[in-house]
Image (spheres, rainbow, N blue to C red):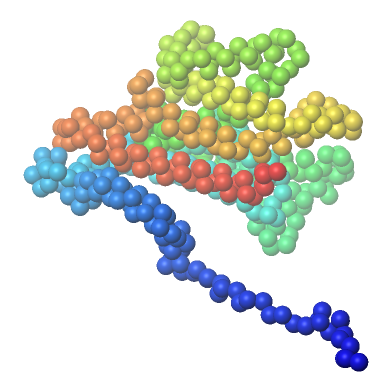
């Protein structure tokens, strides 16, 4: 008899597989170039074609703006004598201070820097993780900071309601940073030291009363300290440049969202009067260009106010721009609200929430997450559209750039100022776009 074969041994016999190709590891700059630009024949061909086209397009601009440019000169004629084919950046450098601050006096421009610096200081605590009540800090910034900045920009006598509100705003900012120091040193908040005393008077409202009491004491302290400090008055007609553009666009950006939210909710309302009033405002404003709204605000708005009330042109423009931005934002908000599932409304009703609680606690937070790209796009468009105020005589950065060409020393200098302010607008708009992308990633808006 022959040998019996074991079937299990045949099944367990090892059969080697063919060797795999080595893993291609791309790292460093050369690896990135090979992966993204020269990964194959067609990829390499497209890369060469694109870079050749960019070279043909950018070569004349680089030669004009950098290689043949004139950076130091006293007049445009001198620029032409040095390099007739290059850009005359000397004129832009000479007028750069006016492009930023307009006709604001040079010796007082530190007030503008201080005003915007305080705005950044007010918003910085919003990124701290240990600090609570960030929504309250943001709301108070919207309500109080304009009075503080406006007093710094305009100046005047250290008395009156405007000066008192500015001191109250500065006191609130000081209290925020005192509490930040106390939090990070492991101590109690400033108002918590007064709570045991005020609990005897009103146990339920002791926290609120202690907060108001600390705020009031700091306000009195600041009023007494700055009582003898007088800021030189600067008329609003002297405002201009990028400073004026930022002021107008900031008001439009801040007020666009709340105006848009209430108009969008009004358009969805079941009350006919509110619904048709909101629709009328939205459709009327969106059916005309922004320049029409600006002209109507300057010419017709004074007719709706008493003769004794004198509105300056900047106030009229800010009101018009805020309404215009709010009407466009209303449609963005309405689109975000329609993206929310009806089940969210039913779930809110099932737990006993009212209309406003449902909107502000359940629906709007979800809708605003979805609307971040559209909201930022509207903000960027609004920041660029504010240059239209130059047509009605406000010396924003666009009008200041045009004035360079009529200066006797730089007569005919048109292209260089426009290129310079285009670069400034690109930096601001690109920064807003990048912040919106980081905010989307942080909030994880993707479903």
The residue drawn where x is 16% and y is 32% is 411
Q: Left of 414 or right of it: where is 119?
A: right
Viewer-nearest residue: 60 or 354? 60
Residue 180 at x, y = what percent?
Answer: 66, 54
Q: Left of 306 or right of it: where is 421?
A: left
Q: Left of 419 or right of it: where is 158?
A: right
- Residue 346 seen anywhere in this rendered image of the structure: yes
Residue 204 at x, y = what percent?
Answer: 87, 40
Instruction: Give the image quarter of residue 167.
Output: top right
Quadrant in which the C terminus appears:
top right
The residue drawn where x is 31% and y is 48% is 54
Viewer-nearest residue: 219 or 236? 236
The residue drawn where x is 67% and y is 76% is 17
Residue 275 at x, y = what percent?
Answer: 69, 13
**How many numbered marks are there?**
0
Q: Left of 300 or right of it: where is 135?
A: right
Instruction: Give the image quarter of residue 388.
Output: top left
Q: Looking at the image, is 423 positioned above or below residue 10?
A: above
Residue 410 at x, y = what percent?
Answer: 17, 36
The residue drawn where x is 77% and y is 40% is 209
Viewer-nearest residue: 230 or 429? 429
- Residue 319 seen anywhere in this rendered image of the structure: no
Residue that sits furthest to the front in the current view: 1
Viewer-nearest residue: 20 or 133? 20
Q: Looking at the image, is 25 positioned above or below residue 57?
A: below
Q: Looking at the image, is 193 positioned above or below residue 198?
A: below
Residue that sits furthest to the left in the current view: 81
Quadrant in which the N terminus appears:
bottom right
């Amino acid at each position: 008899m022959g040998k019996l074969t074991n079937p299990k041994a045949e099944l367990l016999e090892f059969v080697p597989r063919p060797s795999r190709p080595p893993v291609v590891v791309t790292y460093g700059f050369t690896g990135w170039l090979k992966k993204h630009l020269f990964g194959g024949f067609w990829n390499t061909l497209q890369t060469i074609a694109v870079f050749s086209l960019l070279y043909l397009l950018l070569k004349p601009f680089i030669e004009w703006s950098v290689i043949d440019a004139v950076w130091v000169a006293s007049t445009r004629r001198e620029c032409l004598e040095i390099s007739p084919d290059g850009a005359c950046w000397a004129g832009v450098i000479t007028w750069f201070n006016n492009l930023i601050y307009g006709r604001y006096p040079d010796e007082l421009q530190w007030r503008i820097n201080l005003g915007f610096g305080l705005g950044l200081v007010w918003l910085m605590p919003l990124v701290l993780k240990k600090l609570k009540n960030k929504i309250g800090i943001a709301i108070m910034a919207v309500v109080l900071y304009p009075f503080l900045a406006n007093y710094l920009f305009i100046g005047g006598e250290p008395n009156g309601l405007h000066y008192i509100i500015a001191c109250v705003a500065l006191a609130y900012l000081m209290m925020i940073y005192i509490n930040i120091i106390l939090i990070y040193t492991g101590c109690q908040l400033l108002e918590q030291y007064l709570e045991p005393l005020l609990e005897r008077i009103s146990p339920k409202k002791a926290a609120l009363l202690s907060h108001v009491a600390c705020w009031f004491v700091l306000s009195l302290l600041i009023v007494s300290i700055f009582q003898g400090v007088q800021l030189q008055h600067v008329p609003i007609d002297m405002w201009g440049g990028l400073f004026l553009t930022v002021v107008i666009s900031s008001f439009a950006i801040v007020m666009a969202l709340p105006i848009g939210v209430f108009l969008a909710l009004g358009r969805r309302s079941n009350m006919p009067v509110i619904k048709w009033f909101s629709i009328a405002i939205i459709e009327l404003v969106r059916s005309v260009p922004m320049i029409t709204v600006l002209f109507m605000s300057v010419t017709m708005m004074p007719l709706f106010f008493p003769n004794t009330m004198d509105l300056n042109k900047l106030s009229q423009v800010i009101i018009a721009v805020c309404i215009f931005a709010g009407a466009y934002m209303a449609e963005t908000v309405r689109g975000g609200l329609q993206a929310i599932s009806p089940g969210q409304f039913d779930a809110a009703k099932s737990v006993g929430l009212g209309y406003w609680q449902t909107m502000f606690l359940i629906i709007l937070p979800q809708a605003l997450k979805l609307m971040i790209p559209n909201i930022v796009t509207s903000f960027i468009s609004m920041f660029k559209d504010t240059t239209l105020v130059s047509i009605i005589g406000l010396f924003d950065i666009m009008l200041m750039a045009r004035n360079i060409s009529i200066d006797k020393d730089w007569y005919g200098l048109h292209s260089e100022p426009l290129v310079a302010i285009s670069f400034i607008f690109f930096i601001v708009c690109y920064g807003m776009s990048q912040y919106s992308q980081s905010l989307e990633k942080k909030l994880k808006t993707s479903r």
